[in-house]
Image (cartoon, helix red, strand yellow):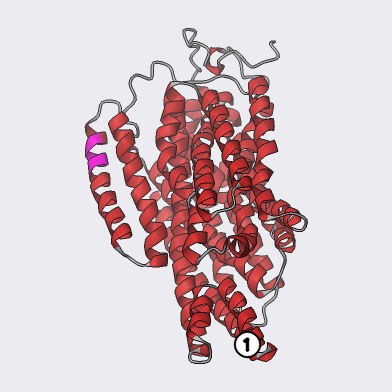
């Protein structure tokens, strides 16, 4: 066997011998995509102080990554199918590493936002490539295990990002958190040449460029409106984006239903397994990403943990994801997908609702059970849904399938942070206003109302003018307001997840039919397409 992986996977007459090594490369690639966001959470306070970020600036430092990531995955996944899935992975890693290096070097708000957008572009290439290469490299009988490992990697990254970033911030400036990704990307890039087999679709035909462009406009305008409107008001920009979304969606649906080779066959939504899995992924990540977003803020700003201490306290979440992923591999074949997925979503709902009990005297132990339940829920629910979504696509559309799955994940996360983040901000502002209205100078009041981090900064200014007692009173009021906002937001998030759990339970079919269909697919021979050139 050649040292380099040069034989296309579809020309092999037996399962690829280095497939588990290839899975390691794909998981490493996924790791940095998730860590890029979770590490930024703990670096945000230092960035805010150093760059003088406003609330809007910080929001776009975070979400400049999300917009291209969500909008481009479907199209870039299809391009990978046509030309080269491994080539897409390598290209994405190069772009992602370049954006990370740029983010560590710039010293302006606009520079960081642009660097994050470049990283988002790289992630949009990498993410669907990891799933399509995984499915292409593994026989059907092993795909569930491989996808389980892929899912567990996401949970590990949720905790590793803050942990490593926190350790770096103890010794270095915030720019070092961008550099976490670079060595991992380089290792994955080089290893991909050795262990990831070439793969692409056979006789793909022409790309649906019009459908691809319409999908970018539709998803991009929707994500922009979701980010901008709830946080900063429904002005001209968000309203225009919503109009573009409606027009783009209508055009996309009409075009795709008539096109002989659509970039995404919308008729798949008529399959209950596919539509139920898509809904589960979207609503699940809406609830869990939103919860993790405000939970980490509470650990840092209210409980006063450093970035490193916050990362350490998120480790139970990662461990629970791994346990849930292991459990779903045993439970799903026995109990069925519907039971496992809805059971996981129910655990996630319970975890979010437990945070409604948070009060002024709450400590880390009050968040431990929600963290464990959310981790178990991710592990139990995501793997079966991802396997079902990818199983709905033929072998020559695996990249598009990965793009569809990952778009649901990212769109759900963006919705969660936007909707629950908006509820959190509104509730916090209302509670703080009731407590300190008329007791602060207007400028300090505006800063304190903007965010809990702003309140701590305002307290420093108040302490210099009015003394430490007044500063401490503001901090206590802000802590109380944020705690009440967390409890209120958790209730809203729990209701959304509970509703989604019921809907998914009604949509997903019974396990018997699904199992029979999968068994039939497993027995089918894999074609040996010897005309496939090296990709």
Q: Which residue is mark 1?
A: 465
Q: Residue furthest top?
A: 531
User: Could you tell me how many numbered marks the image carries?
Assistant: 1
Image quadrant in which you'd find residue 364: bottom right
Main SS category, magenta section: helix
- Magenta range: 251-255
Q: Is residue 68 toward the left or the right of residue 233 in the image?
A: right
Closer to the camera, 33 or 364? Answer: 33
Q: Is residue 473 above or below residue 207?
A: below
Image quadrant in which you'd find residue 266: top left
Percent position (x, y) of residue 222?
35, 52
Percent position (x, y) of residue 318?
68, 53
Please report the residue visible at 71 percent of the width from the left and 58 percent of the height from the top: 311
Closer to the camera, 534 or 504? Answer: 534
Percent position (x, y) of residue 248?
26, 45
Residue 392 in view, yes or no: no
Q: Is residue 314 toward the left or the right of residue 60 in the image?
A: right
Residue 487 in view, yes or no: yes
Closer to the camera, 131 or 104? Answer: 104
What secondary structure is marked by label 1?
helix
Residue 333: within the magenta? Answer: no
Percent position (x, y) of residue 279?
41, 50
């Amino acid at each position: 066997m050649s040292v380099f992986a040069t034989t296309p996977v579809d020309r092999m007459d037996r399962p690829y011998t280095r497939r588990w090594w290839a899975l390691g490369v794909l998981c490493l690639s996924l790791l940095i995509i998730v860590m890029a966001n979770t590490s930024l959470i703990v670096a945000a306070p230092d960035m805010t102080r150093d760059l003088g970020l406003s609330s809007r600036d910080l929001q776009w430092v975070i979400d400049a990554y999300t917009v291209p990531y969500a909008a481009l995955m479907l199209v870039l996944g299809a391009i990978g199918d046509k030309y080269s899935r491994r080539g897409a992975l390598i290209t994405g890693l190069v772009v992602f590493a370049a954006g990370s290096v740029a983010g560590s070097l710039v010293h302006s708000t606009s520079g960081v936002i642009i660097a994050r957008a470049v990283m988002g572009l790289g992630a949009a290439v990498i993410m669907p490539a990891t799933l399509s290469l995984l499915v292409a490299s593994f026989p059907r009988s092993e795909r569930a295990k491989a996808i389980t490992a892929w899912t567990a990697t996401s949970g590990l990254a949720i905790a590793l990002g803050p942990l490593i970033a926190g350790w770096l911030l103890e010794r270095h400036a915030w720019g070092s958190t961008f550099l976490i990704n670079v060595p991992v990307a380089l290792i994955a890039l080089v290893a991909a040449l050795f262990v990831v087999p070439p793969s692409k679709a056979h006789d793909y035909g022409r790309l649906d460029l019009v459908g691809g462009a319409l999908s970018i406009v539709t998803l991009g305008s929707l994500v922009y409106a979701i980010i901008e409107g709830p946080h900063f008001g429904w002005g001209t920009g968000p309203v225009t984006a919503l109009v573009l979304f409606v027009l783009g969606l209508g055009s996309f649906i009409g075009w795709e239903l008539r096109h002989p080779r659509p970039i995404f066959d919308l008729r798949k939504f008529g399959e209950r397994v596919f539509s139920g899995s898509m809904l589960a992924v979207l609503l699940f990540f809406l609830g869990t990403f939103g919860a993790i977003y405000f939970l980490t803020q509470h650990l840092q700003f209210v409980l006063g943990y450093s970035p490193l201490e916050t990362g350490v306290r998120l480790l139970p979440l990662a461990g629970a994801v791994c346990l849930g992923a292991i459990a779903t591999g045993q439970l799903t074949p026995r109990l069925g997908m519907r039971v496992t997925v809805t059971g996981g979503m129910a655990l996630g709902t319970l975890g979010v609702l437990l945070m409604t009990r948070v009060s002024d005297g709450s400590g880390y132990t009050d968040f431990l059970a929600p963290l464990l339940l959310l981790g178990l829920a991710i592990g139990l629910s995501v793997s079966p849904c991802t396997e079902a979504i990818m199983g709905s696509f033929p072998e020559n559309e695996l990249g598009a399938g990965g793009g569809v799955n990952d778009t649901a994940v990212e769109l759900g996360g963006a919705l969660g942070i936007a909707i629950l983040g908006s509820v959190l901000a509104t509730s916090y502002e209302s509670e703080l206003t009731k407590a300190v209205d008329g007791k602060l100078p207007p400028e300090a009041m505006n800063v304190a109302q903007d965010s809990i981090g702003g309140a701590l900064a305002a307290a420093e200014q108040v302490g210099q003018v009015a003394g430490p007692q007044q500063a401490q009173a503001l901090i206590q009021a802000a802590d109380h307001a944020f705690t009440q906002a967390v409890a209120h937001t958790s209730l809203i998030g729990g209701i959304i997840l509970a509703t989604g759990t019921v809907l998914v339970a009604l949509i997903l079919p019974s396990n018997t039919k699904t199992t029979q269909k999968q068994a039939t697919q497993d027995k089918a021979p894999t074609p040996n397409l010897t005309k496939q050139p090296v990709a």
